[in-house]
Amino acid sequence: MHIMYFTERPYRHVSNDEIIKNGFFGLPNQQFDAQKGAQLLNEYLDEKTLAEELGFDGVMLNEHHDTAFCMGSVMDVEASILARITKRVKIILLGNPLPVVGNPLRLAEELSMIDMISGGRLVTGWVRGAGSEQFATNANPGYNRELFNEAHDLVVNAWTKPGPWRYEGKHFHYRFVDPWVLPLQKPHPPIWIPGLLSPETVVWCAQHRYPYVALATFLEPTVELWNIYRDAAAKEGYQVGPENFGYLQKVFVAETDEKAREIAKWDMFGGAGIGYSLFGQPQWMFPPGYNSKEATRRVARQFSDPNAAQGSPFNRCPRGRVDAAANRRRRHPQANLRRVPASRALNAGDLRHAQIGHPENPQGARGAAAGNLRLLAERRANLGGRSSDQHAPDRQ
């Protein structure tokens, strides 16, 4: 097992109330103090060297833009510093947002230098970039996957194909490719791919035999995606093993367990009014064209539909749960023997508030739960005591 240390390296001196209300992306940078930021960046580098001393196998970096969520706007700069000041740990980049880098050949040279300076300790990784990255770099989200695939092929060729050669692609054009900095590791550094819920990315990983790292996703959809990887790998003629999979486990630290849980609930469920993450609001995270239809359906099922037959985290919650058998009967009326009472058909927003509270309910989970019980009573009264398998319109 390979265990690595990772943190988003946030700029911590911002208003928690604003983050909970709006998410990190879109906060005005008037709150940024360069002196405090400089101190934080050096502290984060010190953390990585401490992780090496404590025996971690690797230190991981990532990259986000225009957000206090992550100060690593150019993580290759951090990686180049770590390449020199660390001695043993792998330096894992998860990862470079290929669709928005603009110049894949320059990226290939940067990573080659990091690998050489570190003595061959670089682990590269590619990401499509969060939806917000498209706004931050003025990229067209409709071309995101095309840019990802083409940039990936160009970087790997720059590392492995003897130059000079010419490249003419759909999105990138180079009249002369002959880099004189090449990775120390041959044929190139290992490549890992992190992801959330995109089945296309999982299949692509399996086809290239790249490990897939799930980023703190819910258990059921994670297993589902790993099964997709397994089946795609079988079509490619090989059997997967633990070396093909990774998982990001979030850890929340505070003075007491109670405080840690309070922090965790906002990040995992109640932030930015979307019930999943404090990163950003949906309009920033899912621009038109960014996700495929299948990925969009998967996200909708897992984070908004309490009646999903599989894959929804709300399915396993005690309040508002609708079992898979009931869903099958709803989808197939000819087999419908009973209806699900309206009192059990909470929508995702109700359930989220009942679980962990909401910014509009300062009493927290208990007060939110009581409010939702009153809401259920009102719904039942409006239905005149009838049973129904349809949940009320979403209040979001």
Image (cartoon, grey):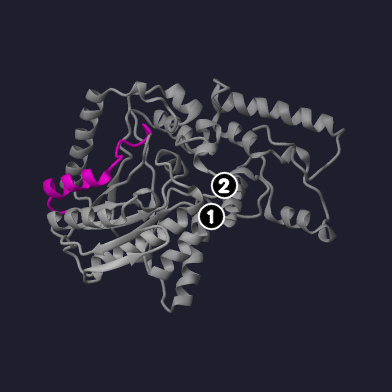
Q: Amino acid at mark 1?
A: Glu
Where residue 187 appears, x then y in whole percent?
A: 23, 70
Position of 271 relative to 186 (above/below) = above
Asked whether the residues under the numbered discs 1 and 2 touch, taking CB atoms below 8 Å apart as contact, a structural biologist would say: yes
Q: Residues within 10 Å of mark 1 (few under 14, many from 20)?
A: some
Disc 1/disc 2 C-alpha distance (Å): 8 Å
Position of 60 relative to 162 (above/below) = above
Nearer to us in this view, 362 or 81: 81
Q: Amino acid at mark 2?
A: Pro
Position of 159 relative to 41 (above/below) = below
Q: Residues within 10 Å of mark 2 (few under 14, many from 20)?
A: many
The mark found on residue 220 in the picture is 1
Residue 149 in view: yes
Where residue 131 appears, x then y in whole percent?
A: 47, 44
Residue 77 sits inside the magenta stretch: yes
Residue 190 in view: no
- Residue at 34% x, 49% y is 101
Where residue 113 appears, x then y in whole percent?
A: 17, 55
- Residue at 28% x, 51% y is 4
The mark found on residue 85 in the picture is none
Callout 1: helix, strand or loop? helix
Q: Which residue is mark 2?
A: 313
Q: Which residues are magenta?
A: 67-88
Does residue 37 appear left or right of residue 208 in this picture? left
